[in-house]
Image (cartoon, helix red, strand yellow):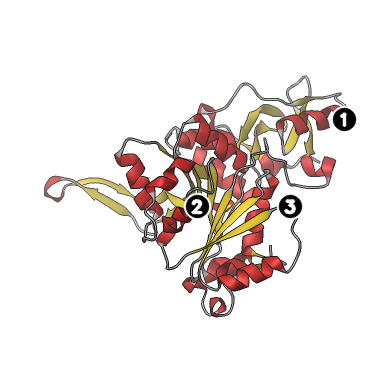
Amino acid sequence: MIEKKIFINKATTIISALKMMDELKRKLLIVGSPNSFKGLISIGDLQRAIIKDMDLNYPISTILRNDIIVAKEGDDKEKIKKIMLKIRAEFMPVINDKNEVVKIVFWEDLLETKKLPPKEKINFPVVIMAGGKGTRLQPITNVLPKPLIPIGEKPIVEHIMDRFVDVGSNEFYFTVNFKSELIEYYFNSFEHPEYSIKYLKEKEFYGTAGSLSLLDGLIDTTFFVSNCDIIVDQDYSEIYRYHKANENELTLVAALKHYKIPYGTVETGYNGSLEEIQEKPEITYKINAGLYILESHLLKDIPKNEFFHITDLIDKIKNRGGKVGVFPVSEKSWRDIGEWDEYLKNSEE
């Protein structure tokens, strides 16, 4: 039976398609209907449109690609599997000569897992900012440091690390401060041959970037930086490819966050004249997700043993004409576990 929920009309807006993917927990949709196949739209298509600063209310017909790959009726299972592995497709529509969708083959049906492999392996160092007090999660952080708060059977920080290990990154640096001995004790209590960890101890609290000065001389390549309370559902190799293709010095990941205004909003002009009124509009912002890619030369720009935020580093880069990029992810592809409401939602992963 064909799953009709993954079909989308080509007149659907970019923002609506993004929400639909979030709702279905899919990153690919079929454009058209079972009786009339029009194309495919992927999360990558939507992200590229957002990066180009396209109006999110444009229909997806404006960004549909012609270079899509589908299976043909009569293709055997092994051929379809080979195609899906090659292009990392989470599902593959099978199309007949009447342009009808006769079947949909899902990744999990072939390989018994919904987890797609990364597009490429990228073995770069990862810095996890694990030194905060976690005041938003008190009183539990009065006992445990925030990185060790459990999500299911693992602490938050291990879920973060797993996503980097998946793309081939296995060299971790933890900047630590508050209850650092408990973090070290936890990771020293079991073997983890798939990754290594080095601990860098702050003397004081240095802000969201100050502790990166401790890495000067230790890292000489592109590297990731992640907060210890966020999980991003994205192939990190795609963020890296965007970072390099645009020759950015720093790339930050931003999650789209949608807010519905429960009132009519009014815009006025000179002398209070009414310009426009909108009934209960929805506003979409890009929220700093707490995940970054940096070039190693930036470590020289961070003052040693001083309070310094990541925004201070970004200002430095931009003031000298350097490039800072923003890679967008959907609202539900980003989870901020650092607040009680969000933690409770995600405590059973």
The residue under label 2 is 215
Residue density around tag 2, few if under 14, some if 14–19, many if 20 or more, within 10 Å? some
Name which residue type carries label 2: Leu
Marked residue nearer the N-terminal end (3 or 2): 3
Residue 161 falls in image quadrant: bottom right
Residue 162: % across, % down: 68, 53
Reading the chain from its start, which is encountered first: label 3 or label 1? 1
Badge 1: how crowded within 10 Å, few (<14), some, or many (20+)? few
* Badge nearest the viewer, 3 or 2: 2
Determine the CA span between mark 3 and mark 2: 22 Å
Quadrant of the rendering where the N terminus is positioned: top right
Looking at the image, the residue that sits furthest to the front is: 217
Residue pointed to by mark 1: 78
Residue picked out by circle 3: 194
Q: Can residue 67 be seen in this view?
A: yes
Q: Where is residue 138 in the image (x, y as percent from the top left)?
A: 51, 77
Q: Is residue 260 above or below residue 4?
A: below
Amino acid residing under circle 1 = Glu
Residue kind at label 3, given as amino acid type: Glu
- Of the pair 227 and 266, the residue shown nearer to us: 227
The answer to which of 159 and 41 lies nearer the viewer is 159
Alpha carbon distance from label 1 to label 2: 48 Å
What residue is shown at x 58% (from left), y 55% (from top)? 173
Q: In this view, does 89 lie above or below 149?
A: above
Q: Check disc 3 and report its element: helix, strand or loop.
A: loop
Residue 152 lies left or right of residue 19; in this view the side is: right
State the residue at coordinates (39%, 36%): 323
14 displayed left or right of 197: left
Frontmost residue, 153 versus 195:
195
